[in-house]
Amino acid sequence: LSFKTYKRSFQTLRFCDVSNNAIQNNATDLLHNIPPNIEEFFASNNQFFGSLPESLDNLPELRQFNMSSNALSGELPGFAESIFSLQELDMSNQSIGFTGSIPEDI
């Protein structure tokens, strides 16, 4: 799965749900090219692994982000604190887990 394939039309993508598809992919590779105007992104119950990229800080419209029930690990990036539009963040049930904290006001 790669957003590069859809580069021409992805500028208008606002909602993406690839949950429950048994996708095995590095999360950094997937999210590095996520559309800049995305508002809701759901990728729960897959087999994404690795860490989340710092480039998530560049998603000013993001309101909901759910990558629960995967195999993500590493330091939780600061995007949760820098994206003021973020209302819901679900990173629960990781088989490995994150370090860092999630702000209480999300």
Image (cartoon, rainbow, N blue to C red):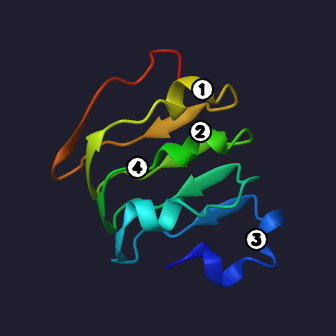
Q: Earlier in the sequence, mark 2 or mark 3?
A: 3
Q: Amino acid at mark 2?
A: Asp
Total tally of numbered discs in the picture: 4
> Can you identify the residue that label 2 sits on?
57
Q: Amino acid at mark 3?
A: Phe
Circle 1/circle 2 CB separation < 8 Å: yes
Residue farthest along the bottom direction in this orientation? 5
Instruction: Using the numbered discs, state the Cα–Cα distance from disc 3 to disc 1 in whole angstroms.
Output: 23 Å
Instruction: Using the numbered discs, state the Cα–Cα distance from disc 4 to disc 3 in whole angstroms.
Output: 20 Å
> Can you identify the residue that label 3 sits on?
10
Residue 82 is marked as 1
Q: Secondary structure at mark 2?
A: helix
Q: Secondary structure at mark 1?
A: helix
Left or right of 84? Residue 80 is left
Circle 1/circle 4 CB separation < 8 Å: no
Q: Earlier in the sequence, mark 4 or mark 3?
A: 3
**Residue drawn at the location 20% of the way across and 43% of the way down:** 97
**Residue drawn at the location 41% of the way across and 53% of the way down:** 67
Residue 52 is marked as 4
Query: Based on the displayed image, in which of its 4 quarters is residue 58 positioned?
Result: top right
- The percent position of residue 45, horizontal first and vertical second, equals 34, 63
Q: Earlier in the sequence, mark 3 or mark 1?
A: 3
